[in-house]
Image (tube, helix red, strand yellow):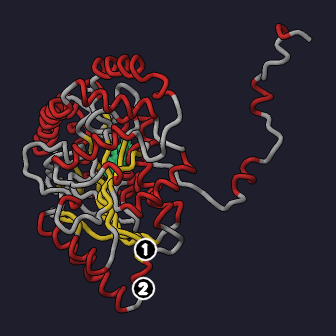
Amino acid sequence: MSQTDGSHRPNQSTVLDTGLPWTGLLGRAGKTPKGSQIRELLAVTARPDVISFAGGLPAPELFPVEEIRQAADEVLRADGAAALQYGPTEGWQPLRELVASRLSRRGIGCSAGQVLITTGSQQALDLLGEVFLAPGMNLLVESPSYVGALQAFSPHRPSFVPFPMDEEGLAVEAVARWLEAERAEGRLSKAAFLYTVATFQNPSGVTMSLDRRLRLLELTRTFSLPVVEDDPYSELSYGSSVPPPLRAFAGGEDVIYLGTFSKVLSPGLRVGYVVAPQPVIDRMVLAKQGRDLHTDGLSQRLVLEFCRRFDPDAHVARLRAAYRVRRDAMLDALRHHMPSGVEWTEPGGGMFLWVTLPEGLETAALLADAVERKVAFVPGAAFHVDGSGANTMRLNFTNSTPEEINQGVVRLADSVRSRLERLA
Ligand SMILES: Cc1ncc(COP(=O)(O)O)c(C=O)c1O
């Protein structure tokens, strides 16, 4: 038979008609991963007529596309073969040095050797899960917490221990009481680590106060509790003064610090980093080897070349100026349009704010109404490990123009009002 009669090409039925019982085969390991609600939502909200406050996306019109193009030309011209070759798991040394020197300007002293380049900070979360977690280990989290972290940690089957948050961030005294009780029961060795997004938290937008940071560092010393500080947003501050990262304080040298170029440059490049004590870096490097060998060498060089040729601080300043207007537009719109009884946080930076509706009004149910009115958000329950937060939602303000933000909040407020009327 010849190639041209099509008999060698798979047709649709040969692709779909597989002989093996895949559902059963996939079930054999007893794993049933839960999809992220955000991902499923993004599919619906990608429709151009929907104003989406659901995703966590930076504004695409602010990406430095032309600068990255020039950086790519230069990288491929000067260093093309190395950029396309395999590279070291720890990361490309010049980028590790750049990260160490940029961090030292923000008070985080570290050597290039203490920097591990990761495939986004999302990979660092996965590596930390691999290194520190086992079934039954206690993992202390903020409530609410970053849903992607919960998703990365869950396969290691830790026992999540949620702690409440207020306008000063994590309730550190509640953590202290829990640690005391665990010590009294002889169970302290079951505490794997505490995970915090201390500055402009995803999802709440809240920042941990200076006093609580100091107290948390004291606790970690007293109880030998590792702290993971995930810090993608602290450079995106809109005027308010922000306490330094936990990692920057005296006594913060043991904090495992996660950073990323996703929010200040481009998430598509997938370049993040970890700063941690050497034994932790060594274990994470071993875990990373088995996962992806190393982070994309071309992306690492693009980041460095961008920072060398252009002024990364000026770029971040542009992002801050634009996002600040959007944050203000959302706060103004909420003040003008939301019915009474609805509350929200006023973030000093980052990409999100957090809305709390009157008790009994479930945001998961509200979402269907909202999408019909062509606006979307993420219902808050996904960010909680204990089933709470049913009346909360996360709103992103960086991926819509101020006009869209106003229009979207009008639609959202209409949905809330009509639900409230139905409840009354
Ligand atoms: C708190 C937090 N950590 C980690 C990430 C993942 O970022 P990256 O793109 O660096 O993997 C995000 C992304 O939204 C985030 O909000």
Amino acid at dot 1: Asn
Q: Residue at x 43, y 29 (%)?
A: 298
Q: Residue at x 27, y 45 (%)?
A: 395
- In the image, taking residue 24 as reference, residue 38 lies left or right, namely left
Q: Please name whichever residue, 309 or 11, is drawn nearer the observer in this view of the structure.
A: 309
Q: Are marks 1 and 2 in contact (CB under 8 Å)?
A: yes
Amino acid at dot 2: Arg
Estimate how packed mark 1 is, as few (under 14), some (14 to 19) or many (20 or more) residues with alpha carbons within 10 Å. many
306 is higher (above) or lower (below) than 103 = above
Tell me where residue 277 appears, x and y as whole percent: 34, 62
- In the image, taking residue 331 as reference, residue 35 lies left or right, namely right
Tell me where residue 402 appears, x and y as whole percent: 17, 30
- List the residue tagged with mark 1: 138
Quadrant of the frame with the N terminus: top right
Q: Residue at x 15, y 56 (%)?
A: 244
Q: Please name whichever residue, 214 or 157, is drawn nearer the observer in this view of the structure.
A: 214
Tell me where residue 235 appears, x and y as whole percent: 19, 44
Tell me where residue 362 appears, x and y as whole percent: 34, 56
Q: Say what secondary structure mark 1 lies in.
A: strand
Residue 253 appears in which quarter of the rendering?
bottom left
User: Is residue 379 in sight in this rendering?
Assistant: no
Q: Say what secondary structure mark 2 lies in.
A: loop
Q: Please name whichever residue, 96 or 394, is drawn nearer the observer in this view of the structure.
A: 96
User: Is residue 183 in sight in this rendering?
Assistant: yes
Label 1, label 2: how far apart the Cα atoms are: 10 Å
- List the residue tagged with mark 2: 187
- In the image, taking residue 191 as reference, residue 345 lies left or right, namely left
